[in-house]
Amino acid sequence: MGQTAATVFSGAGVGFAANASLRAGKAAQEAGDFNAAATINEADYNARVATYNAKVAELQAQDAIARGQIAESTARASTASKVGAIRADYGAQGVNVDVGSPAEVVRSVASGGALDAMTVRLNAAREAWGFSVQAASERSQSEAIRQKGSVDAWNAKTQGNVARSAGRNQAAATILGGAGQLIRERYGARRP
């Protein structure tokens, strides 16, 4: 009777150990699934932030161009006003502004003003280009974040599945090892 009780307790221990391995494997798989979902959610959020930043940079580029156009128009108007004032001053003095030094002064002011206007346009284009590059970078970052999130989620899910398989294998090994032990205890080990 004593050997039978020991065999029953030993069998129960094997069952409990196998069940624990199965539960641990299932828990690891559920943790992997949870981590995969959390990774996807985090990647999606970060990708949306990068996409938003790209849109902001695109708007900043458009704003830079618009501000540049306004500043260029203002510079051209200021130059036209200066040229008009110079011509009026020379005209009030009875000087012909179309020849000689007065004509050179008018051309110089007009040329300098045109150069200022072109500089304003170029600076606006450079600023807009910088924002456009930033927008492209943010869009690339968004895509990279999404791809990395997918890979990390796949890894987490795979690790969970591997852990569950390991738990099943451990449970099977426990059962087989326990069954072998019980058979040896019950029927005695036969040695060759």
Image (cartoon, grey):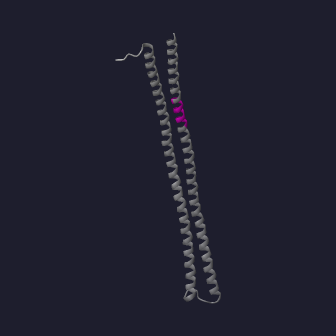
Instruction: Name which residue lies at 52% across and 49% down.
Output: 142
Please tell me whether residue 61 is drawn above or below residue 30 in the rendered image: below
Q: Which residues are magenta?
A: 25-34
The count of marks equals: 0
Identify which residue is drawn at 43% across, 16% down: 184
The quadrant of the picture occupied by the C terminus is: top left
Residue toward you, 7 or 108: 7
Closest to the observer: 84 or 47?
47
Residue 137: x %, y % from top left = 51, 55
Residue 178, position as x, y percentages in the image: 46, 21
On the image, the x and y values in percent for residue 81 come to 63, 77
Q: Residue at x 58, y 63 (%)?
A: 64
Q: Dividing the picture into quarters, in which one does residue 91 lie?
A: bottom right
59, above or below 153, in the image: below
* Magenta part, dominant SS: helix
> Where is residue 10 drawn, in percent x and y?
50, 18
- Magenta-span inclusion, residue 169: no
Taking 46 as reference, is 112 above or below it? below
Seen at 51% across and 45% down, the residue is 146
